[in-house]
Image: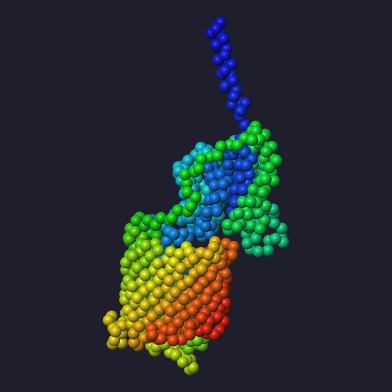
Amino acid sequence: MKARKILLILIVALFAVDTLPAQTARKKVAVVLSGGGAKGMAHIGALRVIERAGIPIDIITGTSMGSIVGGLYSIGYDSERLDSMVQLQDWALLLSDRESMRSQFLNERMDQNTYALSKTIVLDKKGKTSNTGGVIEGKNLARLFGALTKGIPDSVDFNKLPIPFACVATNIIDNTEYDFHSGSLAEAMRASMSIPAVFSPIRKGDMLLVDGGLRNNYPADIAKAMGADVIIGVTVQGAPKTVDELKTGAAVLGQIVDVNCKNKYDDNLAMTDVAIRVNTKGYSAASFTHAAIDTLILRGEAEAMSHWDELMALKREIGLAADYRPERMPMPAGSMTLPEAEALDNTSSHVVKGALGVRFDTEERVSLQMVGKWRPAGRPMEIDATLRLGKRIMAGADLRYVPKGRDVMRLSYKYWHSDLDIFQEGDRIYDLRYSKHTVDWSVQLANLKNFIINAGARFDYYHYVDVLVERDAEYVPGDITDEHLVSYYAHVNYNSEDNYTFPTRGARFVAGYEYHTDNFVKYAGHAGLSDIFASWRIAFPLGSRLSFQPMIYGRFLFGNDQPFCLGNFVGGDWYGHYVERQMPFIGTSHMEAINSKFIALRLKLQQRLGTNNYIILKVTGAQRGDELKNLFDHGPLIGTQLGYAYNSLFGPLGATIGYSTLTHKAHFFINLGFVF
């Protein structure tokens, strides 16, 4: 009898245990995030409200930007962490193949701030490449995704992530949808957001994958197939545009994309239980400024809050109490910052790079410069070829010895052909055309990221094709005759500034000594000419947007019978813009001939407005003379300038107006693009 009672108790207990899951089981909740480029930042705000409501997320799917937000959310980046991550990024850098200044050597920074477009192709020894086209390869995005997903295996079942995940790409080989349920999470996110012709497609087996929005921009059907019982959807697609709204090429292109992204959209939206449609009016897929990102996140949060009652009703429907809160997932092992780029390994591959720079200004009109670089497999060398077209024509070639990717030795040749107007105190004294041939050999004595010391020897030959001298010219800076020079030099270059064009902190120091001869030892039968130049600029932040930048600079030339080609020239905003040794002097146009000894102090205030707009005020005072002892005999030269510039991906776009006591004339100047 006792045994029967024990057996009966065991049977009842077993039935109770067996029915416990059925009693506590709840419906599975999926969150579906649409594509939309920068507008997809609104997903972060919507996720914040879903977390606030205490609704657990069992499945997450997404396309394009939705795949990035969803993929990272699935491994532990909740809304707070995602918000921090997107605020940390330099989106202009991230959405390009440009490198961060902190990872570059000085010559690499100069190249990056000369050429607006560049492309690197890696070839195997048979000449084949894995490159799949696209203006942007997406190297920075791939590095960031790799850092964010650190600790996640390269091949993983996405159903076994902390939150099961899937995302969509489009196979452009046959225009079919490809759904990622396994593999590399970083690669899946990168493929899903690969806008055709903008970002390089991702090659996977015999498929070529691009943005999933072309086939399924709102993948609620995938969430259903993964077992979702209820779906919360966030979409950032705007209302259909009218004929009157399609007045520009960009608007028409956007409409074409939106129409293609409507595939499956209505059917998938119909199976959504709570549809959060964020108003993104005024913003586009390219609105990646920090101000736009902040606004889009807030709009996503506000729109989700307007569905609060629906969310809480859904929470009750799935069988959870109003005060239920799911546990927060552990912090992922990844890093939220973009890691430094690794040097390209050319031990078994050829590395080919091409770059193009285009600029316009009101003096030289349109100029174009292009460069091609080749680093052969297994050899510590690089061959460069450069061509510049415009009022100043240049062609050159460099052979560089680069063990471990660092410059050690260089042999170069350059040819210049220039048509220059030279002024004195605002009046033109010369109109000349000349050609110059230069052969240069140099050795890097030190080559750190912010610091270079180099020394070398150079041969220059100047041939003056046509010279027009104004009759009223009072001062002629040396005879204008063909000249050949053999020079020896040592240069120092230091730069710790945080931005190449618009620095707010850091310092830049350049100095050099050159000894010029015409027979390897002497010049014109006597001692050679000594050439000393230096500039030192420091940037001091006076707040988050205002900086103060004093700079002292000058050049002293010593020796008898100084030739015209070595004379001192000043003008404009930049060093070496017209000729190699020309120095800036604001408030002047063109190139002004000046005495052989020149020193200047420039004060600059730089105010940032918004994200990329700058108002810049400069004041320069300078002294000059033919001997050190009379350097301060004349009153100072004063130059002033007020300017505006926009920091674009193609370089600074802006205009300045200035005045100087050197020319006694107002000067207006427009510059569009990087300076070269």
User: Quadrant of the image for the N terminus?
Assistant: top right
Percent x, y for residue 448? 37, 62
Q: Residue at left 45%, top 84%?
A: 593
Left or right: residue 481 versus residue 659 is left
Q: Residue at left 43%, top 59%?
A: 103
Percent x, y for residue 575? 45, 75
Left or right: residue 377 versus residue 604 is left
* Any part of residue 463 in sight: no
Q: Nearer the viewer, residue 577 or 656?
A: 656
The structure's colour scheme is: rainbow
Left or right: residue 465 versus residue 65 is left
- Quadrant of residue 233 within the rendered picture: top right
Among all residues in the image, which is located at the extreme bottom? 471
- Quadrant of residue 395 within the rendered picture: bottom left
Q: Nearer the viewer, residue 608 or 57?
A: 608
Q: Residue at left 54%, top 50%?
A: 84
Against 527, residue 534 (above or below) is above
Percent x, y for residue 637? 49, 82
Q: Nearer the viewer, residue 591 or 676?
A: 591
Against 203, residue 494 (above or below) is below
* Any part of residue 492 in sight: yes
Q: Residue at left 58%, top 58%?
A: 289
Percent x, y for residue 10? 55, 15
Against 613, residue 317 (above or below) is above
Against 71, residue 318 (above or below) is above
Among all residues in the image, which is located at the extreme left? 521
